[in-house]
Image (tube, rainbow, N blue to C red):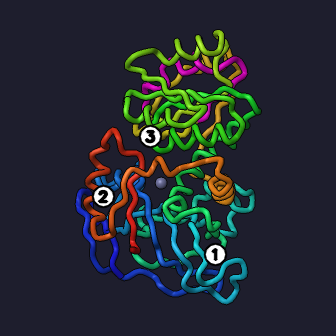
Amino acid sequence: MQALVLEKKGELSLRDIDLPQEVGPDDVKIAIDTVGVCGSDVHYYTHGAIGSFVVREPMVLGHEAAGTIIAIGANVKNLKVGDRVCMEPGVPNMNSRATKLGIYNVDPDVRFWATPPIHGVLTPEVVHPAAFTYKLPDNVSFAEGAMVEPFAVGLQAATRARITPGDVAVVIGCGPIGIMTALAALAGGCARVYISDLSAPKLAIAGQYAGIHPVNITERKLADVIAEETEGWGADVVFEASGSPRAYDGIFDIVRPGGTLVLIGMPVETTKFDVAAAIIKEARIETVFRYANNFDRAVNLIASGKVDLKPLISETFDFARSIEAFDRAAKGLPDDVKLQIKLRG
Ligand SMILES: [Zn+2]
């Protein structure tokens, strides 16, 4: 089977590789249509590792995918051949304590696509458990289906925030996850969301959405803007989606007393924050690692028309041009939000 293989740090090839094709009784086989290029895929390409996950042998990339069912196992009742679907890339141990608690995203045994040593899905056919495969309604395209995975991170963040209708939120960082968190916060009931970054083109893309207010921190201090916009009270919820250690300098200045800080962006280095400032405001701190039980919610919101992710798809590459897509993503162009690879014509 052809696949986009990360041979080692800095080296990609489009070549044949042996991948499991046997459909177990609870599995489905999917003909992959569209795969999104994620920051984590690019990071494995450019750095060869994320934290303790190190690429030691060739690995197929890609984990944001949608396609069509081409075979089902004997026990599968909820899906049939021909269904258009998207897939949740992390498969936990179904007998684990974390899975029993419903927090399968933090199961230490989770097998997650394109996280070493597990292969990803930039390949024409993939076998996956039916329990982690979600039917797409007719009005949701494959391109949108491949956006469900990053949008589910935004929904996990909005869920962790426990938004009350009318809340004012701030999102620090205007990358794909930042923008999708802002959209999830609005869908979850926030009245308005301020999003900050230093990249004017990224802020302009986010600012196309009603309810999202861009703040360019090369022009104004975020804390000044939030103080002005909230009569000095602060935001009900602050989402940190940049992963920059510098974002934590004075971060509690923008959280209202009794407000919430949600940590999404994962800093590469050990990061400090002001504990006293958090305590004085009795701020609640939440963390987000991927998602659990949010894929169906993401699909529902997209299908409802309340959330339109299509403006975030910057360009689509044919499978044959996969390496070009990754080289483009590695450049981190300011106008690019999400690049996608299409495997079928
Ligand atoms: Zn991703």
Q: Which residue is mark 2?
A: 325
**In the rendered image, the vertical position of residue 134 relative to residue 226, given as above or below:** below
- Label 3 is placed on what type of residue? Gly
Q: Residue 124, percent across and down?
A: 41, 77
Q: Which stretch appears magenta? A: 244-262
Q: Residue 44, percent across and down?
A: 34, 55
Per the model, the C-alpha gap separating discs 2 and 1 is 29 Å
**In the rendered image, the vertical position of residue 268 relative to residue 75, given as above or below:** above
**Tags 2 and 1 touching, CB below 8 Å:** no
- Label 1 is placed on what type of residue? Ala
**In the rendered image, the vertical position of residue 336 relative to residue 277, given as above or below:** below
Q: Which residue is mark 3?
A: 175
Per the model, the C-alpha gap separating discs 3 and 2 is 17 Å
Would residue 282 appear left or right of 142 to someone viewing this image? right
Q: Earlier in the sequence, mark 3 or mark 2?
A: 3
Q: How many marks?
A: 3
CA neighbours of label 2 inside 10 A, class few (<14), some (14 to 19), many (20+): many
Task: Tell me: is circle 2 under 8 Å from ligand 1.
Answer: no
| Residue shown at 47% from the left, 40% from the top | 266
